[in-house]
Image (cartoon, rainbow, N blue to C red):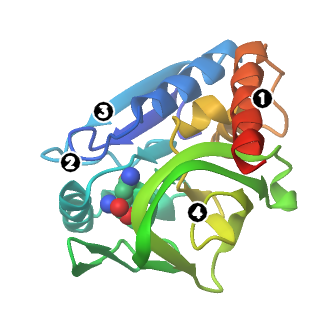
Amino acid sequence: MSTETLRIVWIYPDLLSTYGDRGNALILARRAQQRGFPVEVLEVRSDQRLPTTADIYLLGGGEDGPQALGAQRLLADGGLHRAVAQGSVVFGVCAGYQLLGTSFFAKGTQYRGLELLDLSSDRGPSRAVGELAGDIDARLGLPPLTGFENHGGRTHLGPGVSPLARVTAGIGNDGTTEGAWRGKLLGTYSHGPALARNPALADLLLRWATGAQHLPPLDDTWADRLRAERRTAVATSRG
Ligand code: GLN
């Protein structure tokens, strides 16, 4: 952490905020506070400069137009690149995941991404809409991913990143892998919001940001119920 306070930045809520992305900031803040960390959440709109010294940066989902605009503004701003160079954590969801790569398509046009992750996105034959589940990279030590996806893009990973998960339901990147991570940067197609449905993933980001090896467990009864309900729904729809 750069200061005593854990600083979380939600990037461009005016552009990138589908499917309750604010929930990811709320979950991180709450889970950090419950472990005794003072927390500050900053919502930075697309007409504002991005602070470069925060600990965690969140990028949400978005429709094609706002996604393209968000990428252009972030490239022009340069702040996220400086933050990453200083070791900040970045969590991107769907559009926010795609724009961390080298390129993506929006409304039929190819746009330059931020080139922070070795991946690129094109368009698939149809929209991927529905439940998304997968077994997460064993090195991260997390329980299975659960979420909801809605995207037209398909994402192709280069050698510089690892898949976040192997798909067990839904499409994710390409029907086989889902999401990607490198260092303290992690992206996923999982909405839900992702960190409400995957509190262990929230804790991974908090451990990366704080440097803590372990965080005290919290009462996750409600999250566990939600996870069980969604995993049953996935199994039932398959059977
Ligand atoms: N516009 C992107 C796509 O359709 C991302 C959509 C989203 O963030 N839900 O692929």
The amino acid marked with disc number 2 is Arg
Q: CA distance from mark 3 to mark 1?
A: 32 Å
Kindly identify which numbered label has been placed on residue 172: 4
Above or below, 27 against 162 in this view is: above
Can residue 200 be seen at all in this image of the molecule?
Answer: no
Measured from the top left, where is residue 37 in percent x and y?
63, 20
Callout 3 secondary element: strand
Q: Nearer the viewer, mark 4 or mark 2?
A: 4
Measured from the top left, where is residue 226 in percent x and y?
69, 24
Measured from the top left, where is residue 42 in percent x and y?
34, 30
- Kindly check if marks 4 and 3 are in contact, taking CB atoms under 8 A apart as contact: no
Spot the residue most to the left.
Answer: 47
The amino acid marked with disc number 3 is Glu
Query: Which comes sooner in the sequence, label 4 or label 1?
Result: 4
Spot the residue most to the front.
Answer: 239
Q: Residue at x 79, y 13 (%)?
A: 219
Q: Quadrant of ligand 1?
A: bottom left
Query: Which comes sooner in the sequence, label 3 or label 1?
Result: 3
Kindly identify which numbered label has been placed on residue 228: 1
- Kindly check if marks 4 and 2 are in contact, taking CB atoms under 8 A apart as contact: no
Measured from the top left, where is residue 65 in percent x and y?
18, 60
Callout 4 secondary element: loop
Q: Nearer the viewer, mark 3 or mark 1?
A: 1
Callout 2 secondary element: loop
Query: Which comes sooner in the sequence, label 3 or label 2?
Result: 3
> Which residue is label 2 attached to?
49
Kindly identify which numbered label has been placed on residue 43: 3
Q: Residue at x 32, y 57 (%)?
A: 79
Callout 1 secondary element: helix
Q: CA distance from mark 4 to mark 1?
A: 20 Å
Q: Residue at x 51, y 43 (%)?
A: 191
The amino acid marked with disc number 1 is Ala
